[in-house]
Amino acid sequence: MNSRGQAAACPLIVYGNRIGTLMEYFLELFFGGLTRGSIYALIALGYTMVYGIIELINFAHGEIYMIGAFTGLIVAGVLGALGFPGFAILVLAVIVAVIYSAAYGFTIEKIAYKPLRGAPRLSPLISAIGMSIFLQNYVMLAQTSDFLPFPSLIPEFKIPGLTGIITSSEVVIVAVTVVVCVALTLFIKYGKLGKAMRATAQNRKMAQLVGISVNTVISATFVIGSSLAAVGGVLIASHIGQINYYIGFIAGIKAFTAAVLGGIGSIPGAMLGALILGLTEAFATGYVSSDYEDVFAFALLVLILIFRPAGIMGKQPTQKV
Amino acid sequence: MSKMLELKNIDTYYGNIQALYNVSLHINHGEIITLIGGNGAGKSTTLMTICGVLSPRNGSVVYEELDITGMKAEKVVSRGICQVPEGRLIFPELSISENLDMGAFLRKDKDGIKHDRNYAYELFPILYERRKQMGGNLSGGEQQMLAIARALMARPRLLLLDEPSMGLAPLIVKQIFEIITKINKESGTTIFLVEQNANLALKIGHRGYVMENGKIVMTDTCDTLLANEDVKRAYLGL
Ligand SMILES: Nc1ncnc2c1ncn2[C@@H]1O[C@H](COP(=O)(O)OP(=O)(O)OP(=O)(O)O)[C@@H](O)[C@H]1O
Ligand SMILES: [Mg+2]
C-alpha cells in the first residue's frame, strides 16, 4: 500500500485485471519477458550445442523438453500423493526429469543420427523430423491428447517492493536459468570435456587425432542439451499449470528461432537470442496486442538476419575459413 | 634396430574407391622414414590408416608387436602415435596455449605437461609471444609450428608428419626441418615424414619409400634414393 502511495504522481492505467502505474506495467512485462527468455534459453542451448558439433538441427529436441515436463508431472503426482512438501517435489521432479530426458536424448542420437553420420545432410534431418513426430504420438497414445493440469511446484514467496509485478515462480525460473547459463559457460571454457566439445566443433578430424573420443563428445552434447530442456520443461509447466503432448513443438520452434537469432552454433548467442526474443514478445504482447506476438518475433528474426545473416554472434560467412 | 611399426599388405578404400593397394612398409625405432610421392599418390591415406581415422579393408597395422588394425583413433593416440595432418588443422577459435593443451588431452601428469609446454615454447619462441591469440589468426608458417608443437605435447613415440613444408617460404621450411631432426635426435622420437619436397626430405631421412597410384614402388636408404635416376627425374626435377 505505502509503496503505491509514493507513485501517486504517476498516472494509473488499467491492465489485465489490475490497476497500476506505467512503470509497474513496464516492469511486469519486463519480468514476464525475462521468464520467457529464460525458458527459450534453456531449450535453445540444446539446439545450438548439437548444431555446433554435428551441424544437425535436432527437430526432436522440443519433444525432449515435453518429455521432461511429463516426467515432472508423473513424479509430482506420485510424491504429492505420498505427502512430500512442495519444494522437495520440485527438486526431485527436476532431477528425475533431467535423468529421463537425458536418457532419451542419448538414445535418440544413437539410434536416429549416429547410423546416418556421413550420409547426405538431408538424411539425419529427416530422421530428426521422424523422431519428433514419433515421440509426440508416443506420448499422446501413452498419456492423452488433452491438456493435463500441472501442479504449481514452485512455492509462493513475497518479493519486497515487487508484489503483484513479479511472481515467485518467475523469480525461480530466471534465477535457475542464470545459474545454469553461468555454470555451462564455465564448463565449456575450462572443463576438460568442455574444451573437447569446442575442439570437436571446430575440427572433428583433428579432435580425433589429439585423442578426443568424438562419440563421447557427441553423446555428452545430447545429454547436456536434453538435461537443460528438461529443467525448462518442469519449470515452465509448473508456471503455466498445464501440459499436453504438443507443447514441445511450439516451444521448440520459438527456441530454435532464438538460437538462429543469436547465431546457431554459438552458446552465448543462444542465451542472448533467447533473451531478446522473450523480451520482444512480452513487450509486443503488452503494448500492441497479443495477436501480434509471433509476428513481432519473426519480424525481428528477419530484420536481424538481413543485417547479420549468421545471427548476432554467429560466425559471419566472410570469416569462414 | 627393432621394428616399431609395420604395415602389411594394406588395402584402404574411400567407399568403393580404392586408394591404397597392397601397401607394406616398416619403421624401426629411432628412425626418420620418408615417404614421397606425387599428388593423390595415397600418402595422406597411409597416415590416416595408421592413425585409425581410416580402417583398411585388407591387411594389418602392427605397432610394438600389437595388432592395431581398426583400432579407434583415440586409442591409437593413447599408445603414442601422433599425427601432424596435412593442412595443419589448427583449432581456429582456441588460443595458442589452449591448442597446445589439446595436444596433451590424454595426459594427466600436470608437471610433465607444463615441462613440455615450456619445451615447445623454447623450440618455437613465436608461439610463446602469441600464446593468448586465437590459433586461426596465425600465419601459415606459425600454424605449422603450432601443429608440430601441439603434436609434441602428446609426448609421441612415433610422430607422423604430413607435408610440413607445404606452402611455406624456404627459410621457414629449413627451420622446420632442423627442428624435426632435433626432435629425433634429442628425444629419440621416431619420425615418419610424408613430403612432396623430396630433396629436403630425403636429406634428413634415413630410409625412404616412394609411392605412386596407391602402391609402394621403391624403397631404399635415402642416400641411394637421392642418387637414383628415376627418383631424380620424377621427384627432384633434375
Ligand atoms: N575423402 C576422400 N574421399 C574419396 N577419395 C579420396 C578422399 N581422400 C582422398 N581420396 C582419394 O584417394 C587418393 C589418395 O589421396 P591422398 O590424399 O592419400 O593423396 P596424397 O598422396 O596425400 O596427395 P597430396 O600430396 O596431394 O596430399 C586420391 O586419388 C584421392 O582422390
Ligand atoms: Mg596428402
Image (cartoon, coloured by chain):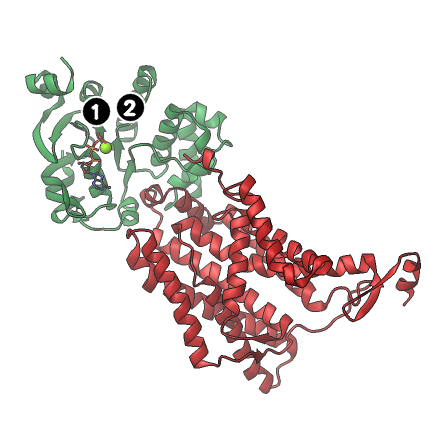
Whether the residue under disc 1 has CB within 8 Å of ligand 1: yes
Residue B46 lies left or right of residue A90; in this view the side is: left
Residue B5 lies left or right of residue A100; in this view the side is: left
Do callouts 1 and 2 point to residues on the same chain?
yes
Whether the residue under disc 2 has CB within 8 Å of ligand 1: no
The spot of residue A173 in percent (x, y) is 64, 64
In which of the image's four quarters is ligand 2 placed?
top left
> Measuring 47% from the left and 56% from the top, which residue is drawn there?
A47
> Measuring 71% from the left and 58% from the top, which residue is drawn there?
A288
> Measuring 42% from the left and 33% from the top, which residue is drawn there?
B117
Chain letter of the red region: A
Q: Residue A9 carries which label?
A: none
Q: In which quarter of the image is the C terminus of chain B?
A: top left
Residue A260 lies left or right of residue B235; in this view the side is: right
Q: Which mark is residue B196?
A: 1
Chain letter of the green region: B
Q: Residue B165 carries which label?
A: 2
The spot of residue A87 in percent (x, y) is 64, 74
Q: Which of A265 and B162 is in front in this view?
A: A265
Sort mark 2 into few (<14), some (14-19) or many (20+) by Cα contacts within 10 Å: many
Tell me the CA gap for discs 1 and 2: 8 Å
Q: Nearer the viewer, residue A277 or A2?
A: A277
Sort mark 1 into few (<14), some (14-19) or many (20+) by Cα contacts within 10 Å: many
Name the subunit of mark 1.
B
The spot of residue A28 in percent (x, y) is 75, 61
Q: Are marks 1 and 2 in contact (CB under 8 Å)?
A: yes
Q: On screen, B78 above or below B138?
A: below
Identity of the amino acid at label 2?
A: Ser
